[in-house]
Image (cartoon, rainbow, N blue to C red):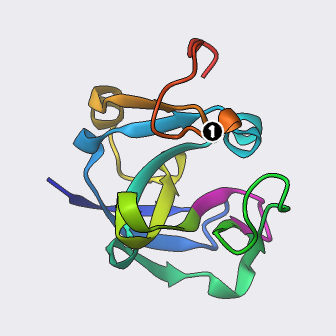
Amino acid sequence: MPKTYRGSCHCGAIRFDADIDLGAGIRRCNCSFCLKLGYRKALIPYEALRITAGREVMKDYQPTPLHWPPGDINHYHCGTCGAHVFSRGYLEKEMGGDFWAVNVACLDDASEVELAAAPIIYEDGKRDRQDRPPEITAYL
């Protein structure tokens, strides 16, 4: 069951509300983006996230075609503190179109108990197989 969480970047310039069902799982991926940033994400429908402040400081990183088809994903981070708060992507089959991947480390009011109770879903993004875990997951 989704719950509305408030979130922000480290300096608080970007703020958002997101309806997230942590019971659906937190995703840990081994793609170069997620791995290098320690990105732990919850996938939610596009309409489930509302940016309440900071659009003017948001920076958009789009990976090169080597890493992801251009235009398929936008990674948003704060231009002031650098925190990566969420990404916007498009998956027709899995998410019904546009979706958000919220960095759960940026949820201000998710309790330690809620985060610890959330199932972990491993993704083998390194091999473009997000629907299955990599052979080794301990480092994620």
Residue segment shown in magenta = 77-86
**Residue depicted at x 79% and y 71%:** 79
Judge whether residue 106 is colored magenta. Answer: no
In front of the other: 132 or 82: 132
Judge whether residue 84 is colored magenta. Answer: yes
- Residue 38 seen in the figure: no
**Residue depicted at x 70% and y 35%:** 126
Query: As displayed, is residue 133 above or below residue 67?
Result: above
Query: As displayed, is residue 10 above or below residue 139?
Result: below
In front of the other: 20 or 94: 94
Badge 1 crowding class, 10 Å Cα cut-off, few under 14, some 14 to 19, many 20 or more, is many
Spot occupied by residue 10 in the image (x, y as percentages of width and height): 65, 56
**Residue depicted at x 34% and y 27%:** 116
Spot occupied by residue 39 in the image (x, y as percentages of width and height): 61, 42
Spot occupied by residue 96 in the image (x, y as percentages of width and height): 35, 70
Q: Quadrant of residue 128?
A: top right
Spot occupied by residue 50 in the image (x, y as percentages of width and height): 41, 79
Per the image, the residue denoted by label 1 is: 125
Q: Is residue 111 left or right of residue 139?
A: left
The amino acid type, in three-letter code, at marker 1 is Gly
Query: As displayed, is residue 54 above or below residue 103?
Result: below
In front of the other: 7 or 68: 68
| Secondary structure at numbered mark 1 | helix
